[in-house]
Image (cartoon, rainbow, N blue to C red):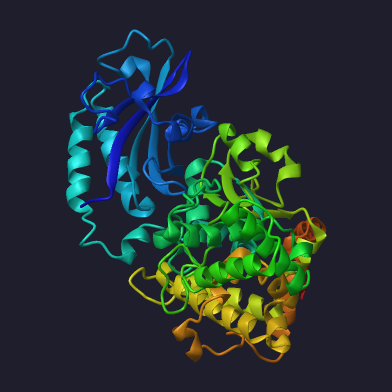
Amino acid sequence: MHPILNVVVVGFHHKKGSQVEYCYPPLRENVVPDPDKDIPEQWTSLPSLAIPDGAHNVKEDVIYFILPSTEKANHAVFGISCYRQIATEELTSKDKEITRSAVQKSVCVLSTIPLFGVLKNKLELITQTYFNEKDFSKFDVLRQMYTNLCDLFDMESMDTYSAYMGISLAPLLDIFKHRTLLLFKLLLLERKVMFHIFPVNLLGEVMIGLASLFPKLVDEGLFEAAAYSVRRFPIDADTAVVEDVATEVDDVQLNFDEKATQRSSKTLLNNVEETLNKIIIGEDASNEETIEEATAVHEDSAKLNPSSFKTDEYGFPLSIFTKGSLFHPYISISYLDMINSDNTRAYCIGVTNALFKTRKDMVDVIVTVDEKGDGQIEILSAELKRQLTLTTQDLRFTDFLLRMKDMNIDPALWEGSDDWVRSQFYIYILALLAVAKSDNTEAASEFNDEFINAWKTKHNYRVWSCTEHPGMGDIQATHPFSGQLNVNDVLLRMGNSLNSSEQGKKMISTISNTGRYVAETGSRFKSSISSWVRNTTSRFQDNQKNENSKS
């Protein structure tokens, strides 16, 4: 059994746009293949993902993307696309449809599990080999690649680490530095987040790197991240009723805003019971007996693991991207309707089309990289800004990570490596969960109590807190970097504040320019003094010689 689904070639047609030109194995058996027409409805966006917006501006790129499964509702498949363009004149065999000076194509691999990092180098090599043929009708190398990948990735021999191989944290940490933790905490709040970064390879590395900081999220927690629709269930199947009642109740709860979640438990319970009765018997409850039956069904369903995933002893992976909270390392403009759908309550998406940035009405946070390569995080809500303010203890944590990373010159060393950084975030989120569960206000303030309070209303925390996790008994409810304030903390907070605001950046620029001016002026002054001393000394020595000669 292997996770590889298909190898696909997508090309750009001057009239039709991006289209599927080849697929192996064929999408439909026992028919004359027509890849572009055979593509399943769930994958109609594949061509626009494989050749992204702005691709003509680069010679090559790599795109990570997620598609809905064709076999299972609210489930995902995972794709990686390797894009190249080549001058038409270099081709030895040209299709009559080729009319432009350059040919743009992508080779994609679709799999049932996320293999983003581990597939990248292999796909880049095969794509280059395919292009080196200079005849795009020669598909033998792609069929051979499919066979090799199936042999290489055997589900029985694969482990959790396979999903993290090749995922570098360097782009994320180098660009966002201390604010990497801000992005980490932002995902826990399940808001509408847009990453607008180019090229797409950098966009994907930043987003997949960020997701990999959450324990077991990449390998097990993205299977419901592609799309979501409310399930309908057969009312004559008892087991289906129990499972889907829990889902339907959760969907109702997820539609509440934050103020609604703070209503009294009695009012909330009444609403849930009313919904349950409508679901189970198709009409409003009119007597106590019916209400008790509905509540019993709810209690039975609550005994099941509320998480959609098989969780470990600590409750990982968290249910961050489930029930209408989406994660897409890259989407095209065709996804606008989906992210604006009533079924979509939150998302973390990667885009390159400038039209997305104009739609600030549909996002809470916009993440970009400026011309200097510095990360910019624009938080559009004052309340969310307060919730995401990093505490002194948070800044100590990130400063420690960055210093250890910078000290790690030898890739073979554990301290400062990507896996070591992930282990530190593992420790951080365990402590965060323990503090949130403990209701210790002093400890909560070390993580930012406004953040804790907001997080406890979110789906991923509610699901986690519904079940006892045996591993959490040994976790201390305190920040890993708890301690007394010191001078270094003040400097860290000043640096973070300056780098997080536009005025602060202008001040840094002014100080930097002033520093250069002072340094240059000082250098010129020093040079002038040295020259004056040399000249004065020389004249004094000449005068002495003249006086000696006279005597």
Marks counted in the figure total 0
Q: Position of residue 452 (x, y in %)?
A: 69, 75
**Left-right relation of 233 to 284:** left
Residue farthest to the top, as pictured: 96
Q: Is residue 108 visible?
A: yes
Q: Nearer the viewer, residue 134 or 39?
A: 39
Q: Nearer the viewer, residue 548 or 419?
A: 419
Q: Position of residue 68 (x, y in %)?
A: 44, 43
300 to 367, vertically: above or below: below
Please name the residue shown 66% across and 91% down the image: 483
Q: Position of residue 257 (x, y in %)?
A: 74, 58
**Left-right relation of 545 to 463:** right
Please name the residue shown 47% across and 74% down the image: 315
**Left-right relation of 401 to 115:** right
Please name the residue shown 44% across and 13% down the image: 100
**Left-right relation of 277 to 149:** right
520 to 347, vertically: above or below: below
In which quadrant of the rendered view does residue 500 lie? bottom right
Q: Nearer the viewer, residue 304 or 517?
A: 304
